[in-house]
Image: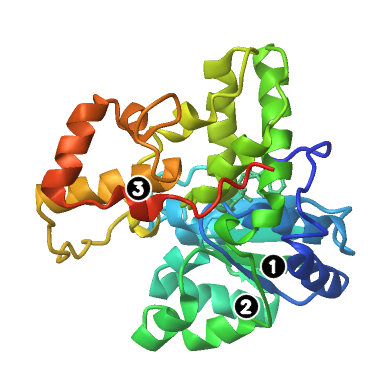
Amino acid sequence: MPSPDDRLIGAETGLAAVMSRARMVSRSNAPVLVFGETGTGKEVIARAIHEDSAFRKGPFRRVNCGAISPDLIDSELFGHEPGAFTGATARRRGWFEQADGGTLFLDEVGELSLPAQVRLLRVVQDGEVVRVGGERAIRVSVRLVAATHRDLPSMVEAGTFREDLYYRLAVYPIVIPPLRDRHADIRAFAEYFAARAADRFGVRPVPVSDEDVRWLSAYHWPGNVREIAAVMDRAVLIGQGRALEIVAALGPTTRPTAASSTPRHGATEATTDAIESLDAAMRRHIERALRHTRGRIEGRQGAARLLQINPHTLRARMRKLQVDWTSFREGETGDG
Ligand SMILES: Nc1ncnc2c1ncn2[C@@H]1O[C@H](COP(=O)(O)OP(=O)(O)O)[C@@H](O)[C@H]1O
Ligand SMILES: [Mg+2]
């Protein structure tokens, strides 16, 4: 959770376009829809918009639409009166009321069920909420910032996201690029998170080298900024103030690339993806390691160490799987 002394990295570089769009809209009361993969900084931008808006004296409330069970969503968003349903003993003010005069950040808005979308649309249109079990309409003045990692236009086409709500929320869309497309900022992120980690863990800070930056730039960052923060934490912890162990820190970050778009609840996920053979998976994994190490096999920064196997074993396996390690070598060393 960003605190006021947290820096926003890349405001003038990788996020320049994002920031200029954010500034353009922040002073209005128009809803904003923020698109971006998980960990790209959607919440960071939502807060920046809040801080730069007429609503900044009011609260900033975040609600994760994907984490609320469908039968509680109305009560969460709009509140309830005592006795509205079993278990509703006291009155509860919903998120809209709690955010009154400020910003309501509807995170993962693409996860809302269709019935919840209908009710959200009504509030967005009327600027009024009715608590569950209540009768009175309560006026709320709330700036809405919604965010999603999903392709909402496709969801609209597929009928899983209401078109009318989409156009209400997407008055002003902002797209945050993934970290892998913000190469100019990798060093700044690495330095910031390395310094923060050293401070947190009480170890001596170690500067980030050009070599470190090359390693980090070669990686594709499916978890984006959140992931580079974790990698730098790990690099600092493993290095213990003597070194930044970037290679070792990058090593165990293997994970399925589709995981970030897995539905959180309720959905019966379509598992129609063909399962690839073990050899194919192994080949891909080895190739990934080679991409990291730029074709290097042996030594401290070699693929064998990343994969935690003997270099001879790795060579034998590459022959068997017909992996061409030379294609991962760089044309020149780039060391100068
Ligand atoms: N530009 C940035 N500068 C500094 N920290 C950032 C930046 N973007 C993201 N972060 C940090 O990365 C983490 C993930 O950001 P977050 O806004 O929660 O991503 P998202 O909501 O897109 O999943 C947070 O800890 C946040 O503080
Ligand atoms: Mg988030």
Q: Name, please, the residue furthest toward the front.
A: 332
Tell me what residue is drawn at x 23 percent, y 51 percent.
323
Residue identified by numbered label 3: 288
Q: Residues within 10 Å of mark 2 (few under 14, many from 20)?
A: many
On screen, residue 326 above or below 113? above
State left or right for residue 91 relative to residue 8: left
Q: Position of residue 167 (x, y in %)?
A: 59, 86
x and y percentages locating residue 246 in the rendered image: 54, 30
- Residue at figure coordinates x 90%, y 64% from the top left: 54
> What residue would you read off at disc 1?
144
Tags 2 and 1 touching, CB below 8 Å: yes
Residue 94 in the image: state x and y as whole percent: 61, 55
For residue 220, side relative to residue 145 (left or right) = left
Please, what secondary structure does the residue beneath circle 1 have?
Answer: strand
Q: Quadrant of residue 53?
A: bottom right
Name the disc covering residue 311, or none. Answer: none
Label 3, label 2: how far apart the Cα atoms are: 39 Å
Q: Is residue 147 above or below residue 161?
A: above
Mark 3 vs mark 2: which is more N-terminal?
A: 2
Mark 1, ligand 1, within 8 Å: the answer is: no
Q: Find numbered disc 2 in the image and state the secondary structure of the residue it sits on.
A: helix
- Residue underneath mark 2: 169
Q: Which of pointers 3 and 2 indicates the residue nearer the eye? A: 3
Image coloring type? rainbow
Residue at the (72%, 60%) spot, across then down: 14
Q: Is residue 84 above or below residue 247?
A: below
Residue type beneath disc 3: Arg
Residue 91 visible in the picture = no
Q: Quadrant of residue 124?
A: bottom right
Cβ atoms under marks 1 and 3 closer than 8 Å: no
